[in-house]
Image: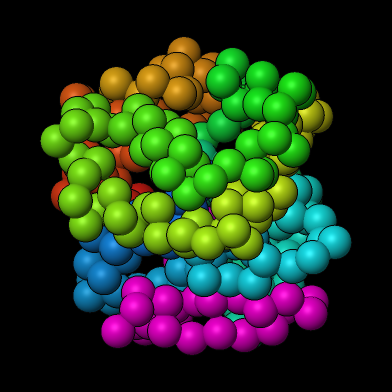
């Protein structure tokens, strides 16, 4: 069975999701270039430990709808998160969010603090930390051109990026794992959607505009970071820990940006410890 076995409509958009387990709800939000597949070695253990885990693909990602003429920016995804919780009958949840999902988690916790019991942000974009120089150049100068890339060239581009997300790209991001991360983009629609729904919205204004509001976060916050993250410097994690009252920073030795690929067991342990706190 696919990791996300179900679909529902939220604000007119089809969302693929997984809702399993009993107990306190925990919502997992993936990053980019990724989808819910990144949580496959973590979420089942959270469910088994007695929690209701909700995992979903953001619109424009994975198995969820790639809506034409629909805003899939961080701001729009933040609004949709509220609609998802409403559709599932969840008033308050713990949010565990990675990368661009961390921007959604930060914005949602600031805008709707009564709906967030706890917030864990993992190797998240923040402040002016994104996009990378490579993506910025593509966005500014060559986005339309990249939408027309043939499959082989697209796969090579995304493979180079994915290899940077883990500590040892050649060893980890290969075989079935690499195929799974490339899978949503194995068509012309998938390639165009990647640039239209993901890359086009790599924009630090979504995190810079909430910088002054991070101090308002009053729920428990934990920051989890891979020591060897090539995309989001550990310095940003340390700054977040300073700016968010009471936030605790945990660094996973030897792990990269996709810390749940490099170190799924420590990540799971941190999440369960946070939920028990």
Could you say where residue 68 lies in the image, as x and y percent from the top left? 79, 65
- Front-lying residue, 61 or 226: 61
Q: In the displayed structure, does residue 50 sit left or right of residue 108?
A: left
Identify the main secondary structure in magenta. Answer: strand
Residue shown at 59% from the left, 58% from the top: 188
Could you say where residue 152 lies in the image, as x and y percent from the top left? 42, 44
Q: Is residue 221 magenta?
A: no
Q: In the displayed structure, does residue 246 sit left or right of residue 22?
A: right
Residue 11's image quarter? bottom right
Q: Identify the coloring.
A: rainbow
The span shown in magenta is 1-29
122 relative to 85, above or below: above
Residue 91's image quarter? bottom right
234 relative to 88, above or below: above
Image quarter hosting the N terminus: bottom left
- Front-lying residue, 277 or 66: 66
Residue shown at 59% from the left, 16% from the top: 133
Could you say where residue 220 lies in the image, as x and y percent from the top left? 50, 45
> Does any portion of residue 48 appear in the rendered image?
yes
- Front-lying residue, 59 or 75: 59
Q: Is residue 6 magenta?
A: yes
Residue shown at 74% from the left, 67% from the top: 67
Could you say where residue 139 lies in the image, as x and y percent from the top left? 71, 29
Q: How many marks?
A: 0
> Does any portion of residue 215 appear in the rendered image?
no
70 relative to 98, above or below: below
């Amino acid at each position: 069975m696919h990791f996300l076995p179900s679909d529902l409509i939220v604000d007119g958009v089809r969302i693929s999701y997984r809702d399993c387990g009993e107990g306190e709800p925990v919502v997992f939000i993936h990053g980019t270039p990724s989808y819910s597949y990144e949580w496959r070695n973590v979420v089942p253990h959270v469910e088994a430990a007695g929690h209701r885990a909700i995992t979903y693909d953001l619109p424009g990602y994975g198995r969820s709808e790639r809506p034409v003429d629909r805003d899939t920016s961080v701001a729009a995804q933040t609004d949709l998160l509220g609609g998802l919780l409403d559709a599932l009958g969840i008033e308050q949840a713990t949010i565990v969010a990675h990368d661009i999902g961390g921007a959604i988690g930060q914005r949602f916790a600031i805008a709707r603090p009564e709906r967030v019991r706890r917030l864990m942000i993992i190797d998240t974009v923040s402040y002016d930390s994104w996009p990378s120089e490579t993506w910025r150049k593509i966005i500014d100068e060559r986005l339309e051109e990249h939408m027309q890339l043939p499959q082989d060239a697209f796969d090579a581009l995304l493979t180079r990026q994915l290899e940077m997300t883990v500590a040892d790209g050649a060893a980890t991001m290969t075989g079935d794992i690499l195929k799974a991360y490339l899978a949503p983009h194995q068509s012309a629609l998938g390639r165009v959607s990647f640039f239209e729904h993901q890359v086009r919205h790599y924009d630090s204004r979504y995190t810079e505009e909430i910088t002054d509001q991070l101090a308002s976060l009053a729920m428990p916050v934990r920051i989890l970071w891979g020591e060897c993250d090539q995309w989001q410097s550990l310095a940003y994690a340390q700054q977040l820990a300073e700016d968010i009252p009471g936030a605790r920073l945990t660094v996973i030795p030897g792990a990269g940006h996709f810390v749940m690929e490099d170190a799924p067991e420590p990540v799971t342990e941190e999440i369960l410890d946070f939920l028990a706190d």
